[in-house]
Image: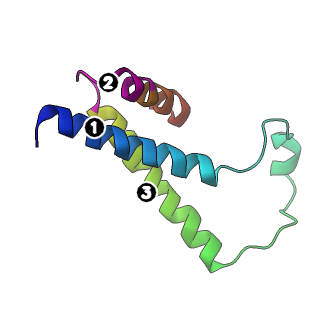
Amino acid sequence: MTTHSTTRALGATVLGLALALGATACGDDTSDTASSASQPSATEHNDADVSFATDMLQHHAQALAMVEMTTGRTLDPPVQALAEQLSSTLGS
């Protein structure tokens, strides 16, 4: 694969991960986390929910690893912007 093709493939992968993370985000920034953390959840969850959350941890780690791969590389501006956004959002 050429460098340009690799950059595009990496960009597409990072974009796909960003879209997946955005689609799975829940909650809002206005909730009072201090009071909600001290009370049990009113919602029910099952083994599938636990499995999904566990899988998302690995997914998150993979996204961070891909963002790290962009460090020091020449990227198309939109891919660079996405990598920077993911880095600040995901906390790498």
- The span picked out in magenta is 70-81
Q: Going from the N terminus, do you reach mark 3 or mark 1 first?
A: 1
The amino acid type of the residue labelled 1 equals Arg
Specify the farthest residue to the bottom: 47
Cβ atoms at labels 2 and 1 below 8 Å apart: yes
Q: Is residue 53 above or below residue 17?
A: below
Q: Nearer the viewer, residue 18 or 30?
A: 18
- Image spot of residue 17 (x, y percent): 45, 48
Disc tally is 3
The amino acid type of the residue labelled 2 equals Asp
Going by the image, does 39 lie left or right of 63?
right
Number of other residues with Cα within 10 Å of mark 2, as a class: few under 14, some 14 to 19, many 20 or more: few
Cβ atoms at labels 3 and 2 below 8 Å apart: no
The residue wearing badge 1 is 8
The residue wearing badge 3 is 58
Please identify the quarter of the rendering in which residue 32 is found.
top right
Q: Secondary structure at mark 2?
A: loop
The residue wearing badge 2 is 76
